[in-house]
Every structure is written in structure tokens, then in C-alpha cells.
Amino acid sequence: MSSKNMTKKQVQTFFERLREQRPTPQTELNYSSPFELLIAVMLSAQATDVSVNKATDKLYPIANTAQSILNLGVEGLKSYIKTIGLYNSKAENVIKTCQILVDQYQGNIPETRKELEALPGVGRKTANVVLNTAFGHPTMAVDTHIFRVGNRTGLAIGKNVLEVEHRLIKVIPKEFIVDAHHWLILHGRYCCIARKPKCGECIVADVCNWKDRFEFGATKPIKLKEIH
């Protein structure tokens, strides 16, 4: 699936177009505080944002702080999130995380990757989402969508998520970096999808380096014949 790397000019155009399409991109997880975002992202592992939102829309009016979720206990929390995949282990991790937040951070969310990754159930990707979305840090959380878009288009080619993450941070201009995570996820979720990408509708198809894009509807550049 990998393509050749994009040029600086291609990368610039790529993000200018995505910005024009979605000037204020947002996560599709519902949240109103850094804590709510952290819990939602923890719950979203191997689950859809829609399923997480259905659960948190019922949970957060009842408990949306570390202490209030802690008060529910593991079984109480499970009753709200049992429709989400892996809810047993997620409930355990959320309760453990809430205990640490209450004991060490007065219920607040730490703003460093090291502190976030020390929380049960929080890995590098979750930490990057929270740092970027809640606090505006220039981090890049690489999920399956971003991994696919990076490799397919030639924006950031890498054998694993860490390689793609480092490449994205390196090649994305500073003016785009804070919103790039959301642009790439949304582009991967709704246009550059896995099996049948919508290349015919893609606003960046002409700067994409994926050689198969024309088979999926991308318009080939017109070569004007010389007029004698």
C-alpha cells in the first residue's frame, strides 16, 4: 500500500485543502472537560466513537469527575459501559486511574505524556489524544485511520505507528500540526477508507501518491496536446 514520500509542496497543499474543508475539526467523542475526554478515549479502544458516546451520554450526567466515578465502583461503572467492547477490563482500568487522579492530582488530568502513560489503561496513543485535544499540544496520535492515510498517500510512510507518528511530526508544517490529528482521522474515516476509498470525491487526490487511486475514481491529469 505504501507510496513514495510526498514533497513539501504536496504536504502543504494537502493540509491547506483539509483545512478549507474542515476549518475547525473536532473529535467525534462527546466531552466537556479534559477528564471526560480521557475517560472517553480510554473507553474507545477497539470500539466506535458512537458506542462510547451512547454510554458516556448516560454516565457523565451521573458521574463526570474522578471522585464521582470512583464512588460508583467497578460494578456500578460497568452498568453504564457494558455495551462497549472489553468493558470489564476498561472498568477496572478507569477505576484505578480515577483513584490515582484523586490521590496524586486532586482529580485533575496531568499534562505530560510520562504522567498520562503511567495511568492504568493509558498508552501512548491515548496520551497523545489528550495532550493534543484537551491541551493543544502538537502531538500526533496514530490510529488505524492515520496509519493507513499516512502510508497510502505518501504523507508519512512507516512500518509501525511510532514510525508514522515521528514522520508526521517531522513533515507537517507548524501551522497545521495542532489540528492535523483530527483532519487525518476524519479524512481516513469518511474518504480514504480501507477497502473502497472514495478517490473520486477526494479533495487531495491530485497531491496523493497512491498509484491505485485512479482505479477508485481519481481524475487523471489532462495532458494538453501541443498545437502546431
Image (cartoon, rainbow, N blue to C red):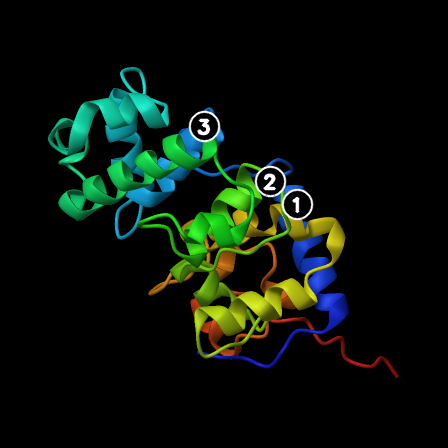
**Residue 38 percent location from the top left of the image:** 41, 38
- Would you say residue 45 is visible in this rendering? yes
Q: Residue at x 54, y 40 (%)?
A: 133
Asked whether disc 1 touches disc 2, contact meaning CB atoms under 8 Å apart, the reply is: yes
User: Which circle, 2 or 3, is nearer the viewer?
Assistant: 3
User: Which circle, 1 or 3, is nearer the viewer?
Assistant: 3
Q: Secondary structure at mark 3?
A: loop
Q: Residue at x 59, y 81 (%)?
A: 4
Q: How many marks?
A: 3
Q: Label 1 vs label 3: CA separation?
A: 37 Å
Q: Amino acid at mark 2?
A: Arg
**Residue 195 percent location from the top left of the image:** 33, 65
Q: Secondary structure at mark 2?
A: loop
Q: Secondary structure at mark 1?
A: helix
Q: Residue at x 47, y 39 (%)?
A: 27
Q: Amino acid at mark 1?
A: Arg
Q: Which mark is residue 106?
A: 3
Q: Quadrant of residue 9?
A: bottom right
**Residue 220 percent location from the top left of the image:** 60, 71
Which is nearer the eye, 35 or 185? 35
**Residue 82 percent location from the top left of the image:** 13, 36
Q: Which mark is residue 192?
A: none
- Would you say residue 155 is visible in this rendering? no
Q: Quadrant of the N terminus?
A: bottom left
Asked if 180 appears above or below 73 in the picture, the reply is: below
Circle 1 residue: 19
Q: Amino acid at mark 3?
A: Gln
Q: Which mark is residue 22?
A: 2
Q: Quadrant of residue 43?
A: top left
Q: Residue at x 63, y 78 (%)?
A: 5
Q: Label 2 vs label 3: CA separation?
A: 36 Å
